[in-house]
Image (tube, rainbow, N blue to C red):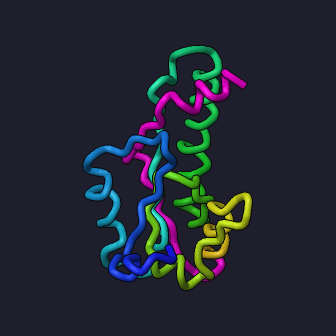
Amino acid sequence: MSCDYVADYEFVAIFDADFQPGPDFLKKTIPYFKGNDDVALVQTRWTFVNKDENLLTRLQNINLCFHFEVEQQVNGLFINFFGFNGTAGVWGIKAIEECGDWMDRTTVEDMDIAVRAHLCGWKFIYLNDVKVCLGPALCQNILQT
């Protein structure tokens, strides 16, 4: 965020290395900012490449589906606050700057920025129908530990 070229852009899409956004991801997310000057974040749903591979991946899928289907949607609709999941979301750079910038010295920088943005009055939008696929690397890493 401190690079000079950031000044030329309005938005930043954030993905962990093992996420695979579709080629139309920005076309599906950026329009939610237009005409909504109080929107800081558009968060999308995660899906999993290997959700049926074994018991662990099936359980992870159930747990995270509940998180997205219930927690994110309900909080987004009724409370207008939900935690940023750290990936598969688009932030307005203005919102990040106005609420104190991205702080990478905290363990939970995704929740930190979400709370600060919410306290500054910014709104969040959750899109359950826009899905970003998480590759098998996460589940494989867990199985190896």
Q: Which of 14 and 35 is in front in this view?
A: 14
Q: In this view, does 57 lie above or below 131?
A: above
Would you say 115 lies left or right of 92 here?
Answer: right
Would you say 43 lies left or right of 101 here?
Answer: left
Pinpoint residue 43: horizontal percent, then vertical percent: 47, 57
* Magenta-tinted stretch: 119-145
Q: In this view, does 66 lie above or below 101?
A: above
Quarter of the view holding residue 8: bottom left
Q: Nearer the viewer, residue 102 or 27?
A: 102
Residue drawn 32% across the image and 65% down it:
30
Quarter of the view holding residue 67: top right
Tag count: 0
Membership of 120 in magenta stretch:
yes
Residue drawn 65% across the image and 75% down it:
116
Pinpoint residue 125: horizontal percent, then vertical percent: 46, 63
Q: Which of 2 and 10 is in front in this view?
A: 2
Q: Is residue 91 above or below residue 38?
A: above
Residue drawn 51% across the image and 18% down it:
52
Q: Nearer the viewer, residue 145 or 28?
A: 145
Quadrant containing the C terminus is top right
